[in-house]
Structures are given as structure tokens and as C-alpha cells.
Amino acid sequence: MYVCSCFGITEAQVKQHAEDGACTPRQIASACKAGTDCGSCVRRIQALLGRGACPRRELADQGRPVLAELPGAVGLDEAA
């Protein structure tokens, strides 16, 4: 089922990005653009993410780097 009609992003894709470490709608948007056009899917993305465990939050709690752990993430030095 489609979550984001603007970019054709499915529920399964959002769940996969979440499993890969995206914990917030903004991180989902960075991974696949969902929620960046009309915004009508942001609440659905929030619902899919729920309040489950967040791998990136767990890494931060352990004092480990979190951005390098997310596949496809752009680091600060790469964005310039």
C-alpha cells in the first residue's frame, strides 16, 4: 500500500528504511523523499514508526556515532 503518493513510496519501503535506522519522519524523508512534497503522508509515517526501538537512538545512548551507521546517509563534510 502506498504511503506517499507524491513519490510512490510504499509502506514496506518506509518499514525497510526504519529497519535500516531511520527513526523519524525527517530521517525517512532523507532516505526516500516521502513527506517532502505535500506532507499529507507525514502522520502515516509517524504511525508506522510508532514508538518502537530506534537503532540510532540506541547508538547515541551508547556514545557511538549514529550518522555513519545509516546506509546512504550524507555526512556533514560530504554535503558541502
Image (tube, rainbow, N blue to C red):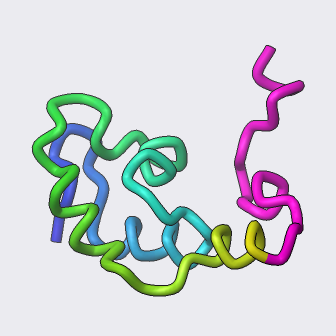
Which quadrant does the N terminus fall into? bottom left
Q: Residue at x 37, y 53 (%)?
A: 25
Circle count: 0
Q: Looking at this view, is 20 or 52 the one in front?
A: 52
The answer to if 67 sits in the magenta stretch is: yes
In the image, 65: left or right of 40? right
**Looking at the image, which residue is at 28% across and 74% down?**
48
> Image quarter for residue 20?
bottom right
Farthest left residue in view: 40
Decide if residue 4 is on the left or right side of residue 20: left
- x, y percent for residue 77: 88, 25
Q: Position of residue 68 (x, y in %)?
A: 84, 55
Q: Residue at x 24, y 29 (%)?
A: 37
| 3 in relation to 20, above or below | above
To which quarter of the image does residue 26 belong? top left
Magenta stretch in the rendered image: 62-80
Q: Main secondary structure of the magenta part?
A: loop
Q: Quadrant of the C terminus?
A: top right
Q: Is residue 54 left or right of residue 4?
A: right
The residue shown at (22%, 71%) is 47
Please identify the residue farthest to the bottom as the structure is shown: 52
Report x, y in % for residue 13: 40, 67
